Amino acid sequence: MKYIQLGKSGLTVPSVVLGCMRIRDVSAKEAEELVATALELGCNFFEHADIYGQGTCEEAFADAIHMSPSVRDKILLQSKCGIVSGVMYDFSKEHILSSVDGILKRLRTDYLDVLVLHRPDALMEPEEVAEAFNQLQQSGKVRNFGVSNHKSSQIRLLQKYISQPLVTDQLQFSLPNSSMIQSGMEVNMTTAGAIDRADSILDFCRLNDITIQTWSPFQYGFFEGVFIGSDKYPELNHCLEEIADKYHTTPTTIAAAWILRHPAHMQLIAGTTKPSRFREICAACDITLTREEWYRLYLAAGHILP
């Protein structure tokens, strides 16, 4: 396993995180095997959200890892809040505080290492968020805070009011979904990739020591499917297979290594429920792609070099 610093938190964390969004899709025995595999590979960081299975995924994880004080001391837990049944977002103080209480109860723990605000709330009042964060930190229920799917101006607005540094921003990122790189590569051009849809979030996070956590690292579009093995990406898959052969590994490992090769030191969220696939993803930590290989994959994914 490769390790990085998580923003300004002071935490040393694995570069690959086990995302637990689908842990309810497998049996209790399979969930235990998945969590045990993660720990065996040096991944002690587990990522949740109260919306996943309406909280049942957090409960399933606590069962799978046999949560106890001795277990809790060895792992890092992150969860997200802010989405209400898929019909609205709520960053009110009351909702944040009640959400955390529910998360802690389901995970059978007294604190979260990181609490993440899940997607921007258009009705956010940053003063309320600041009050909630202060109360959570002072009570010991949350040690660090982050955001998900926020652009730089939204982070700046929050940071104006809160006293804690935001240590993470979760963003969709994969070989095909690389708009935050494209906009920098195609700057001052009239191409579609030149449109800065993310408010220069990549550079902003690097400038402000915010760790980017990548979600859907093997998907194309918005949950349209996995690009590995897809006939929609023949050139990319040929390139992945060719480079995988060189390193005696798999296309999945190379696709993950492409993300981890970026000097922003991103943290990859792996949402698989298969221990074998999680092993493939973690194997990327042992591979450092050359600059030429990284760009070959970028171009094969359909991007351009001006």
Image (cartoon, rainbow, N blue to C red):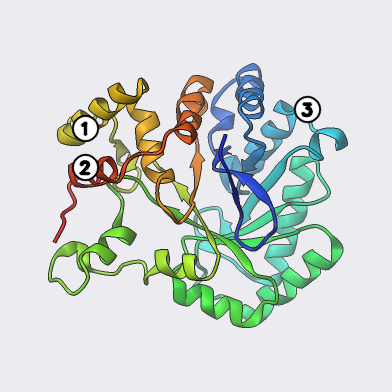
Q: Which of disc 2 and disc 1 is earlier in sequence?
A: 1
Q: Is residue 81 left or right of residue 150?
A: right
* Camera-side mark, 2 or 3: 2
The image shows residue 81 at horizontal and vertical percentages of 62, 57
- Residue 164 vertical placement versus 238 (above, below): below
Q: Please tell me whether mark 3 sits on a helix, a strand or a loop.
A: loop
Q: Is residue 232 visible?
A: no
Quadrant housing residue 239: top left
Q: Give the Cα distance between marks 1 and 3.
A: 42 Å
**Residue 84 coordinates in the image, percent (x, y):** 57, 57
Q: Mark 1, residues whose alpha carbon is within 10 Å: few (<14), some, or many (≥20)?
A: many
> Looking at the picture, which amino acid does disc 2 mark?
Arg
Three-letter amino acid code at the position of disc 3 = His
Q: Quadrant of residue 229?
A: top left
The type of residue carrying mark 1 is Cys
- If you read the primary sequence from the N terminus, does the residue marked by circle 1 or circle 3 appear first? 3
Examine the image and state in which quarter residue 8 appears: bottom right
- For residue 11, above or below residue 224: below
Residue designated by label 2: 296
